Image: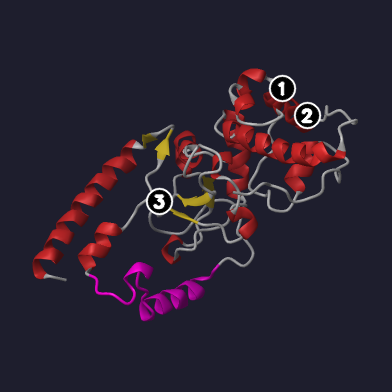
Amino acid sequence: MEDLSSGSDSDYTNSWIAWFLSSKGNEYFCEVEEEYILDRFNLTGLNTEVANYTQALDSITDNIDEDIPDELRGALDVQARHLYGLIHARWIVTARGLAKMLEKYKRADFGRCPRVLCQSQPLLPVGLSDIPYEKSVKLYCGRCEDIYSPKSSRHGSIDGAYFGTSFPHLLFLVYPNLIPPKSGPVDVGLPVRGAPTEGDNQRRTRRAREEPELPAETIGEEFSTASVALKAERYRPRIFGFQVHEIAKLQRWQEAVRDRQVARLEEIGV
């Protein structure tokens, strides 16, 4: 996972948060209000997650002691970034935090879905685990309900725990009018320069049809369509650990259909 170490230890002149947000690779983060950070109730339990917790918090709130030795300052800066990431994960599921991330979503700050049929649907960051240092951040498409890796290596190395597993699904729960349709044009936010045109999408679709790819583990060895289908993984949207009801219902139906198709393929030996 990313240690969020871009930038030097003392190259900011305004607030620490403003410097952090302006650093390259941190574009996915939004500003956490200082009032939220100063309320210790919101930070319950984080003192066990971060070394030098008190000094790291002082650094975020611009109350750090100027007499800290240089050898400690570097490590403290990394710990402050980690602490801010953990606070950020809690902030973005609050009403005010959701509103701030909503503005970034409308601007497509997190990128757009690479799937051709999603027609450049804006994406949302999501973690595959709420535990730090386990999984890097992914991007969720509300249209195809699948996840993708960020294009930038800077973004791809951000810890997924800094966004949590619930955020995008909670956003659509709070703002149901933003749930994207499964077909038709995308109508979220402003157009992004360089977004694929219809002609680009058609050319990409033809290439995809002309150049089918085999799963890496099956290259060079015999495989069946049924075995590949059974190995396929799928993303399951959850809010605080509970699978989203309507999506869970749809996925159960889809999996039942898939199982029937797999059984038929196995019968005919495909």
Residue 77 image position (x, y, % from top left): 76, 39
Tell me the quarter of the picture where residue 226 sits: bottom left
Q: Is residue 206 magenta?
A: yes
Residue visible at 56% across and 57% down?
150
* Residue 164 vs residue 178, the one in the foreground: 164
Mark 2 vs mark 3, CA separation in Å: 37 Å
Mark 1 vs mark 2, CA separation in Å: 8 Å
Q: Which residue is mark 3?
A: 145
Q: Considering only order in the chain, which callout, 2 or 1, is on the residue closer to the N terminus?
A: 1
- Badge 3 marks a residue whose secondary structure is loop
- Could you tell me if the residues under marks 1 and 3 are in contact, i.e. CB atoms within 8 Å? no
Q: Which mark is residue 148?
A: none
The magenta stretch is 196-223
**Going by the picture, which residue comes out furthest to the left?**
267
Q: Amino acid at mark 2?
A: Thr
Quarter of the figure that contains the C terminus: bottom left
Q: Considering only order in the chain, which callout, 3 or 2, is on the residue closer to the N terminus?
A: 2
Mark 2 or mark 3, which is nearer to you?
A: 2
Q: Amino acid at mark 1?
A: Leu
Q: Which residue is mark 1?
A: 38
Residue 258 image position (x, y, % from top left): 21, 56
Scheme of colours in the image: secondary structure
Q: Amino acid at mark 3?
A: Glu
Q: Which mark is residue 61?
A: 2
Question: What number of labels is visible?
Answer: 3
Binning the other alpha carbons within 10 Å of mark 2 as few (below 14), some (14 to 19) or many (20 upward) gives some
Q: Is residue 168 left or right of residue 22?
A: left
- Badge 2 marks a residue whose secondary structure is loop
Q: Is residue 177 magenta?
A: no
- Could you tell me if the residues under marks 1 and 2 are in contact, i.e. CB atoms within 8 Å? yes
Residue visible at 79% across and 42% down?
74
Residue 216 image position (x, y, % from top left): 38, 69
